[in-house]
Amino acid sequence: MNRIHELFSWQHQESLLFTRLDFWLFFLAVMAVFVLIHKRYLLRSIFLTAVSLFFYFKTSGNFVLLLGFMLLFNYLIGRGVGYLNRPKWNKAFLISGLIVNLAGLFYFKYAYFFTDAFNAQFGTDFNVVNQFAVIGNEWFGKGSFVDKILVPIGVSFFTFHNISYLVDISRKEIPAAKNFFDYAFYVTYFPHLIAGPIVRARDFIPQIHAPYQLSKYDFSWSLWMIGKGLLKKLIFADYIAVHFIDKVLDAPDAYPGFVGLIAMFAYSLQIYADFSGYTDMAIGVSKLMGFNLLENFNSPYKAVSVAEFWRRWHKSLSSWLRDYLYIPLGGNKKGSWGTAIMTAVILGFLYFITGWVELWYTYGMLLVVYLILWQFWPAFRTFAVRDLNLLITMIVGGLWHGASQNFVIWGAMNGAALVIYNYWKRISPYENATHWSVRAWRILLTLTFITFTRIWFRLPEADQPLKFLTIVTEQFDWTSATWWKVWNNYQGIFYLIMLGFLSHWLPQKWKDQTVLFFSKWPMPVQALTFAVSVFIMYQAVSDTFKAFVYFQF
């Protein structure tokens, strides 16, 4: 009875993570029912919505009520946007839907951040009150909800799903879902619900009423994706993080500076293995159920430029920001009032969180230069708009990751790099070079820059990145005695890091041929190989499982 109670109650330590046995038992149970009802599409949608809400409850507890409310609200708003033949009413429904979705995201994710910044800026002492918890505790009993505002897992992901759904309806790219459960199934579908990839309604909803298909190759490919995802998460992410990265980055002054540098490159491997490992498993699990989720990563550390990196990394977020922010702002073709408003808002925001009065003087000087160039250099108008829109998009992308000025700085650095690259590629003698040595150093340079910016991504406090860089430079101590001492302590970890990067850099055709070779094995041999491989991987797992990095976003 106690075990049954644990299974059907929320306990943080018993979350249904892809790396836990409980998830795979849950998935087997879901598949057992799914096989019986897969031809009855409405029943299938109802069932998968119900199990997805249960999955979210096991991950986030009572926040499932918030998810349920947002499902009902956005379904009704979508009907208003799509079915009324009155453009003004359609637009009013769309705007109200966007406001509620963004307000919910800002309330849960940024309330403390903005309140603390306001108090610091104006010397006030305002406190954040979780009004939802107050109401919930009155309705469901005291203690049902935590008074402190907690960030619901996956809130950024399901908010972006809802926004894209409403906008696509208003653009006439898709019709509003006639059936509530089709829409609810699209948003809550458990493989992508809490950490992506971000799925567009136009890509997913048509699959809901498509016949179930799973070839032998599809089954083998799914098994391969799940195994690859587990390998990335358990070995190249968790094992390296627990035994090396976390130790060094949590106390960098206890190590020689070059060790901190190695730890940051290892962190680039960790965050890729962690996030792409999750999406690999999500895509594999989804394929077994007959639904296709789009690729989210395309070997990003093979990129030869920052621009190519962002076309390969977290592709679903990059394309979402492009289609729903960058292009509406004017893209690289024209300016808009949105560009001007967003520029002013971001500038005010940066001043608000930093208190740097110098920002206004800098902005004033840049504005004068901007207006002069705009007046006397027609070509500048296109360049300036493109550059501003890129910076805005990347800063918003940084803020999407978390309520911290470090995320804003991280986004701004990547945006500035994209702007600089757009000019550099026009004069670069290496832009079209194909020699392997040129490609190798461009890949290394891009990886080094991305790793450098991730110092602000990994270290949460505002002063930590500069302190870390100071330690790295002042305590570098690259002597043979120090190096061999570090090598002897972390030899196995360093081999794993090198193996992780080398496997990432293997030609894609080699990887495709490996999957094809695996798919030709008899299914019992595949299953046995998979089981043995997973068993070996779990021997490297420490006593505690690390949550997926992107759960916090």
Image: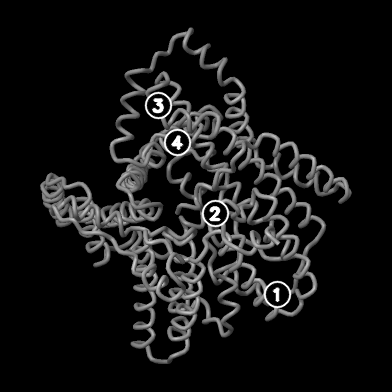
Whole-angstrom CA distance, mark 3 to mark 1, is 53 Å
Q: What whole-number distance in Å separates the C-alpha atoms at marks 4 and 3?
A: 24 Å
Tell me: 175 left or right of 321.
right
Residue 351 vs residue 36, the one in the foreground:
36
Instruction: Tell me the number on the disc at residue 210.
Output: 1
Q: Position of residue 171 (x, y in %)?
A: 44, 77
* Residue holding disc 2: 12
**Mark before the other along the chain sequence, 2 or 3:** 2
Give the residue pinned by disc 3: 252
Do the residues under discs 4 and 3 have CB atoms within 8 angstroms? no
Q: Distance between the residues labelled 2 and 3?
A: 30 Å
Q: What residue type is labelled 4?
A: Thr
Q: Which of 435 and 248 is in front in this view?
A: 248
Judged from the image, the secondary structure of the residue bearing numbered disc 4 is: helix
Closer to viewer: mark 2 or mark 1: 2
Judging by the rendered image, the residue that carries numbered circle 4 is 446
